[in-house]
Each structure stands twice: as C-alpha cells, then as structure tokens.
Image (cartoon, grey):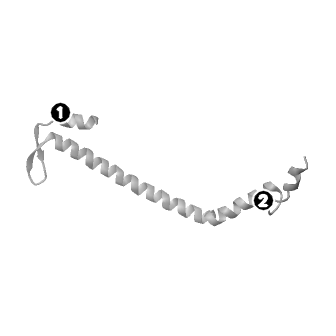
C-alpha cells in the first residue's frame, strides 16, 4: 500500500535511457513496474528453493527408509511395545483386575 501511494504521488514524466535509445515514461509506471518485477523475481527464486528442498527431503526419506510404509510399521512396533503384546491384548486383562 505504501509503495502504491508513493508511486501515485510521483506522476511526473522521466527520461528512461535504454541501451538503444531513450523514452519518456511516467514515474508511477517505472516504480510500479520495478516493484512488480522484483516481486516476481523473489517469488520465482523462492519457488525454486522450495522445490529443491522438497526433492532433498524426498531423497533423505528414501535413504533413511522412513517412507510411509516403514513409518506405519515402526508405529505398529512402538504401539505393540507400549501395550506389552503383539496384538495389544496383554494389558487388557490387567486394567480390569483393579
């Protein structure tokens, strides 16, 4: 919002020097165009970084063997250990004898 207000205040034409010539543009368009291009560039770089991190995460999961199937087996073993039996029935009788 602050950039938009700043851009609208500066509406005077300015001379833009290109490599092959010059042109007069309203300063508001130069400011808004620069902000837009900067935002797109930052967004693109951010998307590339997220993609690379996702790929690295996927490779690390495959290398450590913690895919979704292995994770489910690990959770089943942990639950079995906590309950005292492979099917969870070992602790069922103890809780009713209080």
Q: Which residue is mark 2?
A: 80
Across and down, in percent, residue 54 comes to 49, 59
Q: How many marks?
A: 2
Q: Which residue is mark 1?
A: 9
Q: Decide if residue 92 is on the left or right side of residue 25.
A: right
Instruction: State the quadrant of the N terminus.
Output: top left
Across and down, in percent, residue 34 comes to 23, 45
Q: CA distance from mark 2 to mark 1?
A: 69 Å
| Circle 1 SS class | helix
**Sequence-earlier tag: 2 or 1:** 1
The quadrant in which residue 68 appears is: bottom right
Q: Decide if residue 50 is on the left or right side of residue 88.
A: left
The quadrant in which residue 88 appears is: bottom right
| Circle 2 SS class | helix
Across and down, in percent, residue 11 comes to 13, 37
Report the mark closest to the observer, 2 or 1: 2
């Amino acid at each position: 919002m602050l950039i938009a207000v700043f851009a609208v205040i500066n509406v005077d034409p300015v001379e833009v020097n290109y490599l092959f010539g010059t042109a007069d543009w309203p300063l508001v368009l130069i400011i808004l165009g620069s902000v837009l291009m900067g935002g797109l560039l930052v967004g693109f770089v951010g998307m590339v970084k997220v993609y690379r991190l996702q790929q690295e995460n996927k490779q690390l999961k495959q290398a450590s063997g913690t895919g979704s199937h292995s994770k489910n087996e690990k959770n089943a073993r942990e639950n079995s250990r906590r309950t005292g039996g492979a099917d969870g029935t070992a602790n069922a009788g103890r809780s009713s004898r209080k």
